[in-house]
Image: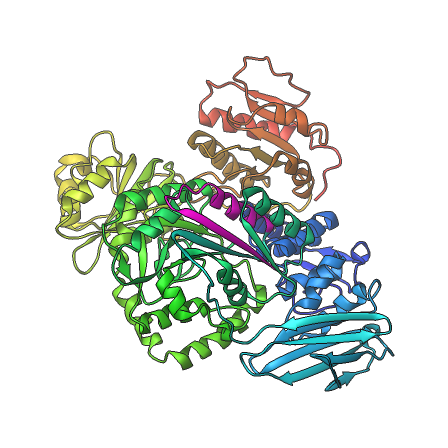
Amino acid sequence: MIVGGTPGHVGCPGLLHAPARAGSLEEAVLIASPAARETFERIDAACRGSSFPTAQQLSLRALSLLAIGDAAGCRSDLRRAFEADPADPEILRACLDVAPDHDVSRAAAALPSTDDDLLRRAAVHLLEVEPLISRTERTVSGLSATVVCRAGASPTAAVDGAPAAFDAVDRTGTMGVDVFRIRRDLPPTSSARITVTLGSHTTSASVPPHRSSGTRATTRHGSVSVVVPVHGGREATRACLASLARQTCARALDVVVIDDACPDPAMADEVASTVATRGWRYLRNDDALGFAAAVNRAASVAVGGDILLLNADAMLPPDGVDRLLAATATPGVGTVVPFSNDGGFASFPGMRGRNRVPDAEEADRIDAAARRAAPPSVVDIPAGTAFCMLVTGPCWDALDGLDLGYGRGYFEDVDLCLRAKRLGFRNVVAPSLYVRHLGGQSFGSARRTLAADNARLLTERFPGYAAEWMAFVEADPLAALRSGIERHLPPSAPVRLVAGRAAAAVAAMSTDHEAALTLTLSEDRDGARLLQTSGDGFPRQLRFGRDEREGLAAYLDALDIAAVVLASPTNALMRDLEPILSDAVPVSVALTGPRALCQLRSGRGPVGRAAALPLDDMGRAALGQDVPPLAAPRATRCSVPRVAALLSRATVDAGRLVTALDRRLQARGGDLLVFGPAPSGRSRPRATGIMARSDYAAALDRHSITHLLLPDAETPFRLVQDLRRVSPSPAAYVDWSSGRHPAAAGDLAIDPAWCEDRCVSALIAWCLSAPPAPGAAS
């Protein structure tokens, strides 16, 4: 995809537009294919499914909004993406193309990069108010500075007061600017200051030593210092500082917040105000030094005996600091990290791959489960991650802080842990604590290059580390701890249990079910029982050993099991299932095992009452449900109904109703979209995710909605009345008020006594007969 004539952006299917000059978004020629709207809906649902959508998600949604012609929405999302990650070159480039301002331009100009195109684009805007732009950075070998002026200008430079000639000059005048460069070698422990002058205008910048010290002048061993470096991500930073303010720590907290040259002035002012209000200490770097240098500077003034390094995208539970400190009572501990969704070796529920970021309520549930399940001892790991890492005072002082050889970031925390291990300190996990970590809030698309370069440096310094982490991953010493936490996180909604050697295949092939969640029960090669979900819920992989049959029985007994499906179960699994099989639990047999087959043939037991179910011609298990007809192609015009089901929360009854309506509506060429959280079920309709009230009006237009549906009493009727001010769409609603709602022409009042089939039939007839909302267009 090309935006503003610049190649290289991540594209959205179905979007083409002619090149436009920078800033002329309204002049862009949009040609939206039929896939563009569906692309937007998928990306929009992903953004709304997270409390804090990542910068990359927001930028993708911005581009998809551009594809459907929403220029204002595109600008808004690009601005939010910039606030979340002001160091992503591709986001900065997109902002400069379609929504440029001085904040974005300054961030792009300050970004350490060899991308002259991005620097020139930023200079086009900044040179309107400033005669020259300079960018200075510390490299491994020394000093590197770049100066940009209007074409034909002649700046001068000095390093530490001595005149310095430019090493390279590019006077091609591309985009109306010239580029000048200076490079100087410096010892690793030396700093320097460069001054650039053009006429009466002068700029100065300092570069720190390549290796600086985090040594502290004084310490109070009875207190704890919390160091929070801040650069971008306003919403995440706000939540992080709020969680820190709620701490109920037995020791005094010395909080030091360091603003590492945040490019968003409004965010910088908000952080400074919050810190002042809380009585914390505030530092600011005039130039962005990176994570390690910012932490070292803050740690050098910290007075707490132990130091907690806390990313601004991590949210601590109220007594999180206390639980980290409890782990330091173990002899020899140097660093402590909690469990987290994105915590390296201490990731939960899966160590391999990236886990979904939970919302705040779910994170509290996981943390409570970790507290209940935690063993009395800590567990050693090769290295921790500094998003939330407590470093004991003796360990920090012995290491003299983070090593600055890793530049802007990546692996400096691993380096710290491996150096600590060489000195005899232990790196451990505090098993009683879970911390929510948004992750991915820095570096943007530059992260791969940074990670690759720093991985090579880490390997050079610690050649045995790769073999160590591979051995740890293979042995997985934290598996029992993760399983213990999951045992305290049973699903609260009804579940369908698919058991047997073919459980995973049958669960994946089934078309529909009423339960909110599908669990599979199978055996591994050691005879242990494995319980897993088919989605994002818990348990991700819960393991019960051969000698834990009672524990498995207790776990299954605590579940609300709506149905059981047997998929070639072994005799051992049938014995495990017998205590939960009763007349009240429907049993279906997709594929039979030996014990189940005997019960079928004899007619005895719960299985004997179940009929073996055929497989349809697609090889999918019908599991007692009618296979829905193939949906007609979705209409690209609004001559057919497009229904918005307004849900404030995902209830089972409302989910069943909208799922059934969606299936039958698609068979007639219509469409349904849930405005709110996705209902449960494998064939669930598309959903936007949770929406704010202010979002509805724009969403009605973006999705070309013709009809509104309130499928339960959870969503207030006044929402329909509010929406009618911007769209005259007819509405259907469950009339719990016995006619007291002021129904408009074309509305449908659903009697609460109607069964599901009657509701769906009435809704289909209403959708096909009620006229579409005037002015709706695809």
What is the total number of numbered labels drawn onto the structure image?
0
Is 59 located above or below residue 383 in the figure? above
Magenta segment includes 249? yes
Locate the C terminus by quadrant.
top right
Q: Nearer the viewer, residue 403 or 181?
A: 403
Position of residue 764 measured from the top left corner of the image (x, y, whole percent): 56, 30
What residue is drawn where x is 72% and y is 28%? 725
298 or 433: nearer the eye? 298
- Report the residue at 17% width, 51% height from top: 570
Asked whether, in this view, residue 533 is left or right of residue 134, the answer is: left
Q: Is residue 481 left or right of residue 632?
A: left
Q: Nearer the viewer, residue 331 or 54?
A: 331
In magenta, the rendered stretch is 234-260
Q: Residue at x 58, y 38 (%)?
A: 691
Vertical position of residue 8 compared to residue 35: above or below: below
- Vertical comparison of 391 with 608: above or below: below
Q: Position of residue 169 (x, y in %)?
A: 77, 84
Regarding residue 376, the answer to whether it shows in the image is yes
Q: Tell whether position 385 is magenta.
A: no
Place residue 89 in its image quadrant: bottom right
Q: Of residues 564 and 490, which is closer to you in this image?
A: 490
Using the rendered view, name the quadrant where residue 767 is placed: top right
